[in-house]
Amino acid sequence: MSALFHAKHVLITGGLGFIGSNLAIRLVREGARVTLLDSLKPEYGGNLFNIASIEDCVRINISDVRDEHSLSYLVKGQDFLFNLAGQTSHLDSMLDPVTDLDINCRAQLSILEACRHHNPKLRLVFASTRQLYGKPDYLPVDEKHPTRPVDVNGINKLAGEWYHLLYHSVYGIPTCCLRLTNTYGPRMRVKDARQTFVGIWINRLLQGEAFEVWGGDQLRDFTYVDDCIDALLLAATHPKALGRVFNLGGEERVSLDELAALLIEVNGGGEFVRREFPADRKKIDIGDYYSDDTLIRSELGWRPRLTLCEGFRHTLAYYREHLPKYL
Ligand SMILES: NC(=O)c1ccc[n+]([C@@H]2O[C@H](COP(=O)([O-])OP(=O)(O)OC[C@H]3O[C@@H](n4cnc5c(N)ncnc54)[C@H](O)[C@@H]3O)[C@@H](O)[C@H]2O)c1
């Protein structure tokens, strides 16, 4: 993949966040000229420490995707745009729906307008979410499954996705959307459960405290962040990716109880307690979910490379070393 990004100009919105920073590290390694745009709002996953190893090799722009003027300037001259900035908390989208609308919907349209006016040839990948399917009618969930979001975040991400597809079909902007499932790995937010429950589990575990599993029987699938980066890079370069939507998934589907037990096993100790789902979360929970990711495997040749066990091993090693930077 190296030659495809060498000396290319790449803009990553949400570039100081979990997935964005891991992507930036990979792209710097591949010789790209990377600009990171991020608002660094403390409630979200942005963290300057995420890019400590490459800070001298990237351009950082602390700004907001809601700022149309910044975007019009920043998209100029870029070869690729990885559009990852987002409000990611499902509960927050219910408590403050208008902010979610502004970031996950309205700003997405203005990013696309900036591309249309200033750089319609750049390859653009949008980080969508499996949340837009809602409670599955069948498992595994493929891309043909109806979209029936159970929270405001899912509705806005769905609109964001459609804007990207529309700007491909009407204006020819080369876009691709990936519907991510639970992604985990180094540099995710572990301070709390805003980004993913796996984060707070690891935080508690490494501090010698029991972590809470809400429910426990729900089935989920997981993508290790490096595998997610592989998919983002394929989505940005593969000719068959244009104007299309792909699910991401993983090899294993596990219940949350099984996942908790695996994490403890890989850590070599620890404990968890099972708790009833809090009422406000229960209402927006999607129940069992796992993806059918056959399409991205067959069309783009994507394959997850790490097992959950290996992914947890890398993740725990990272936070054993760096946990204080994330508290
Ligand atoms: N991590 C997952 O499991 C997962 C699952 C499905 C979808 N996604 C999507 O992937 C993308 C990246 O998620 P992540 O897990 O890296 O989360 P993250 O919170 O770590 O990254 C998002 C980044 O966007 C930045 N941001 C938020 N609002 C912004 C704004 N208005 N202007 C500029 N920057 C802003 C945040 O500061 C943060 O650094 C998101 O769009 C998310 O919806 C992630």
Image: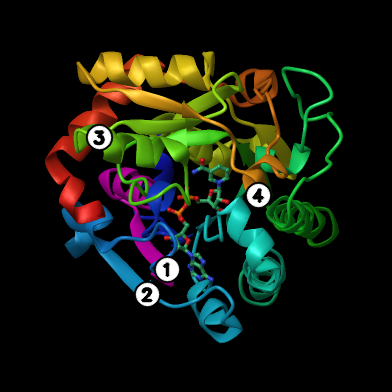
Q: Is residue 15 left or right of 28 when viewed as pictured?
A: right
Which residue carries the number 2 mark?
61
Q: Amino acid at mark 2?
A: Asn
Instruction: Write down the quadrant of residue 226 in the picture.
Output: top left
Q: Amino acid at mark 1?
A: Asp
Decide if ligand 1 comes within 8 Å of the CB at mark 1: yes
Tag 3 or tag 1, which sits nearer the N-term?
A: 1
In the displayed structure, would residue 90 be above or below residue 294? Answer: below
Task: Please state the extent of the stretch shown in magenta in the rendering.
Answer: 21-40
Measured from the top left, where is residue 186 in percent x and y?
30, 39
Q: Nearer the viewer, mark 2 or mark 4?
A: 4
Decide if ligand 1 comes within 8 Å of the CB at mark 3: no
Tag 2 or tag 1, which sits nearer the N-term?
A: 1
Considering the image in quadrants, where does the C terminus appear? bottom left
Q: Is residue 121 visible?
A: no
- Which residue is drawn at the image coordinates 19% and 33% (left, top)? 208
Q: Using the numbered discs, state the Cα–Cα distance from disc 1 to disc 2 in whole angstroms.
A: 7 Å
Label placed on residue 209: 3
The secondary element bearing badge 3 is classed as loop
